[in-house]
Image (spheres, rainbow, N blue to C red):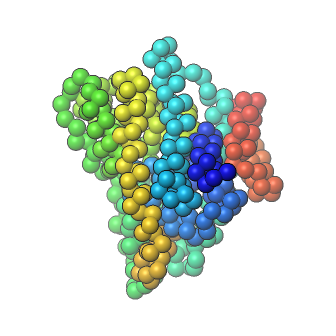
């Protein structure tokens, strides 16, 4: 199997099974491409996570592009990104068709109820392995702790990451504990500030494919943070400014993005189909994901060079510790909302044992969790 064929098959399969959001996707990639296939070192994988968190766009999707680039160059980047996105976009498009045709979404909650606890176990396992690699010494502990506390208190993810990286670099290279203390004050920037930066659309107007494409191109080029930030952009632009969607349609679109595997940003596919059929879905999907291909193509060759400088290496180490702290904050929040019954706790425990003790792959854990959810929940 050639490299490109291997890349296409593996990322297409990942795109069909990667439930649970960016943290879960990255955990699955760590399992598949670092632990099992050893495409790159865990250190370089961490460097790519840290660097990817500094640019706009869907982080886990951009990680697929990085891994594709590492394995197959620029062509591998294109193939990996496309094969990860297309299955999710196709499934979301089918949900949108059913929604437009029948006025409701298919019932998938019993299956998802089991997938969520299994995904939580996958994330926790990856967090443990990446955390051991990222925390290179006690001096990174205050950086990670500060980022975790700030994000848990509601600070914006990108501000937390950048501040953790810069102050951590100074803490590692120059200063003392004052940098770690200052981080808590500087990290307190609410997530809503990032949403406000994107609400620049103007005037209600009939749905235009050009305007629809440009709107999602803008969102893809400036979107930092989680899928919750995307919701704010859609509400401000498509519900508030353009008046193209109702609040209920927006909530249904977000639900569809959660129901399907792969990147949550395929919510754009659902919205595009509702507003403009197949053409609208195509335009919206291309618009929101195209910037990521450009960002990764520019960023990937630079990352190894950053590791060679003592200053940039210190920055990367601090960013890596901050990225693990972000992942830990997401894991805690997911645990709070997922572990609401003894059945869910049982699925987490079983998935954790299957992964840590017997080395079960993330794909089988997801499928097993879905089956257990259908039976138990």
Decide which of 40, 140 is in the foreground and name it: 40
In the depicted structure, whether residue 336 falls above or below residue 234: below
* Percent coordinates x, y for residue 136 in the rendering: 58, 77
307 left or right, relative to 107:
left
* Percent coordinates x, y for residue 246 in the rendering: 34, 24
Q: Which residue: 31% across, 35% down?
A: 213
Query: Total of numbered circles in the picture?
Result: 0
Q: Is residue 32 visible?
A: yes
Please tell me in which quadrant of the rendered image residue 27 appears.
bottom right
Decide which of 78, 159 is in the foreground and name it: 78
46 left or right, relative to 28:
left
107 left or right, relative to 274:
right
Q: Which residue: 65% across, 34% down?
A: 113
Q: Residue furthest top?
A: 102
Q: Which residue: 41% across, 29% down?
A: 281
Q: Which residue: 75% across, 35% down?
A: 372
Q: Residue furthest front?
A: 2
In the depicted structure, whether residue 225 falls above or below residue 147: above
Q: Residue furthest left?
A: 203
Quadrant of the image containing the C terminus: top right
* Percent coordinates x, y for residue 122 in the rendering: 66, 51
Decide which of 297, 331 is in the foreground and name it: 297
Please tell me in which quadrant of the rendered image residue 328 appears.
bottom right
Q: Is residue 22 visible?
A: no
227 left or right, relative to 349:
left
Decide which of 345, 161 is in the foreground and name it: 161
In the depicted structure, whether residue 188 falls above or below residue 336: below
Please tell me in which quadrant of the rendered image residue 112 appears.
top right
* Percent coordinates x, y for residue 125 in the rendering: 67, 57
């Amino acid at each position: 199997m050639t490299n490109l064929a291997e890349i296409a098959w593996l990322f297409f399969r990942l795109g069909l099974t990667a439930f649970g959001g960016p943290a879960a996707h990255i955990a699955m990639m760590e399992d598949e491409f670092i632990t099992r296939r050893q495409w790159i070192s865990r250190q370089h994988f961490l460097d790519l996570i840290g660097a990817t968190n500094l640019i706009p766009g869907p982080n886990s999707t951009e990680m697929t592009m990085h891994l594709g680039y590492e394995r197959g160059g620029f062509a591998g980047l294109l193939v990996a990104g496309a094969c990860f996105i297309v299955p999710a976009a196709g499934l979301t498009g089918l949900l949108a068709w059913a929604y437009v045709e029948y006025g409701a979404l298919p019932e998938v909650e019993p299956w998802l109820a089991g997938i969520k606890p299994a995904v939580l176990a996958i994330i926790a396992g990856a967090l443990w392995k990446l955390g051991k690699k990222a925390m290179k010494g006690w001096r990174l502990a205050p950086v990670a702790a500060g980022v975790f506390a700030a994000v848990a208190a509601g600070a914006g993810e990108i501000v937390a990451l950048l501040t953790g990286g810069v102050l951590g670099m100074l803490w590692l290279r120059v200063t003392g504990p004052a940098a770690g203390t200052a981080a808590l004050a500087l990290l307190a920037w609410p997530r809503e500030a990032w949403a406000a930066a994107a609400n620049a659309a103007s005037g209600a107007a009939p749905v235009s494919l050009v305007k629809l494409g440009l709107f999602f191109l803008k969102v893809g080029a400036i979107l930092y943070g989680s899928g919750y930030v995307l919701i704010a952009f859609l509400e401000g632009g498509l519900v508030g400014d353009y008046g193209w969607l109702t609040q209920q349609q927006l909530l249904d679109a977000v639900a569809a993005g959660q129901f399907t595997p792969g990147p949550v940003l395929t919510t754009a596919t659902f919205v595009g189909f509702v507003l403009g059929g197949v053409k609208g879905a195509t335009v919206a999907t291309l618009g929101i994901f195209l910037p990521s291909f450009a960002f990764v193509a520019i960023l990937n060759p630079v990352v190894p060079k950053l590791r060679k400088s003592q200053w940039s290496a210190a920055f990367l180490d601090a960013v890596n510790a901050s990225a693990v702290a972000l992942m830990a904050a997401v894991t805690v929040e997911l645990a709070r909302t997922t572990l609401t019954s003894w059945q869910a706790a049982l699925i987490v425990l079983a998935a954790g044992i299957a992964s840590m003790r017997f080395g079960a792959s993330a794909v089988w854990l997801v499928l097993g969790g879905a089956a257990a959810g259908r039976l138990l929940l």
